Amino acid sequence: MKRVIIPTDFSLAAINAAIFAFDLYKNKKVEFYLVHAYQIPYTMPEIVPVGGEMIQQELKTTLNKEVDKLKQFTKYSKLSIKPILKFGNPGVCISELVKELKADSVVLGTTGASNLKDVFFESSAFDIVEAVECPAWVIPIEARFESLRNLMFAADFIAMQNKNVLAPLVDLATDRNSFVQILNVYDTENDGDIEQEGITFFKTLQQNKIDHGYKLIHQKESVEDTLLDYVKQNETDLLILVKRHYGFIKSLFHHSVTRGMTFHADAPILVLHDNE
């Protein structure tokens, strides 16, 4: 039985992420956990500050209604969806819950923040991705579940600390009969060593008979722009990144670049965690 956590802020983006998760795991036995984390002071949608007990009761009611809303779809009516209300920082709460439940993944939505009012939720989403130690799916509000046949794995070619870090990628590619495009963005004219180090990354795919390719592209204005341009110009159903325990995708992405990707990428993103 798999356990999947779906953080929610009751937005359309969160609902879209939940639907994506349901479709993603439709052929698996799964317990879904719809989780809302809140802090004091809390402002309800009507922009009226309320007290602690009232907040808790209102949020429990809202969370239960959210589960009922999702189960109104006939194909989701029999799913196991458990509401969980947590008090505290969203990143900390979700991270602790991942450990407590031994969750297999977290699936969260983003709006593609284009204005200041959305930045808070986007920041919370990024904090959750950075905090959890399980695969995290980041689903833009416009994304819909597709075949996931074309996967792009952005590699930095640093040796993996966790030998099982690519297991979710391998399982996904095997289940969906996917093609995996290994992509490396570099900013040096000498690419010989990079290609040699890259061999290690796709040996796992070869051993599992997963169709794959390798692409080395030169950085343009920034790593972010180069990668996102490639995603837009090439058919990509999912972008896969690796978060290092000591830094988010060291040598390929830095903290602010990845935050930008979380805000603006059109394709869903799967973040794998290479924990020592």
Image (tube, rainbow, N blue to C red):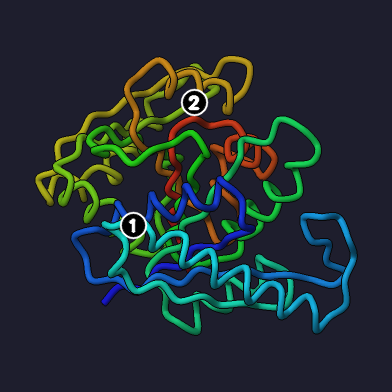
Indicate the quadrant where residue 268 lies.
top left
**Spatial CA span between label 1 and label 2:** 28 Å
Quarter where residue 201 is shown: top left
On the image, numbered disc 2 is attached to which residue? 227
* Residue depicted at x 37% and y 25%: 192
* Quadrant in which the N terminus appears: bottom left
Q: Position of residue 152 (x, y in %)?
A: 35, 34
- The residue shown at (66%, 72%) is 92
Whether residue 173 sits left or right of residue 160 in the image: it is left
- Residue 41 placement (x, y as % from top left): 88, 69
Do residues under tags 1 and 2 come within 8 Å of each other at their CB atoms? no
**Mark 1 Cα-neighbour bin, 10 Å: few <14, some 14–19, many ≥20:** many
Question: In the image, residue 95 lies at what x, y percent?
Answer: 58, 72
Q: Residue at x 47, y 60 (%)?
A: 69
In the image, 51 versus 195, the foreground residue is: 51
The secondary element bearing badge 1 is classed as: helix
Determine which residue is flagged by label 1: 22
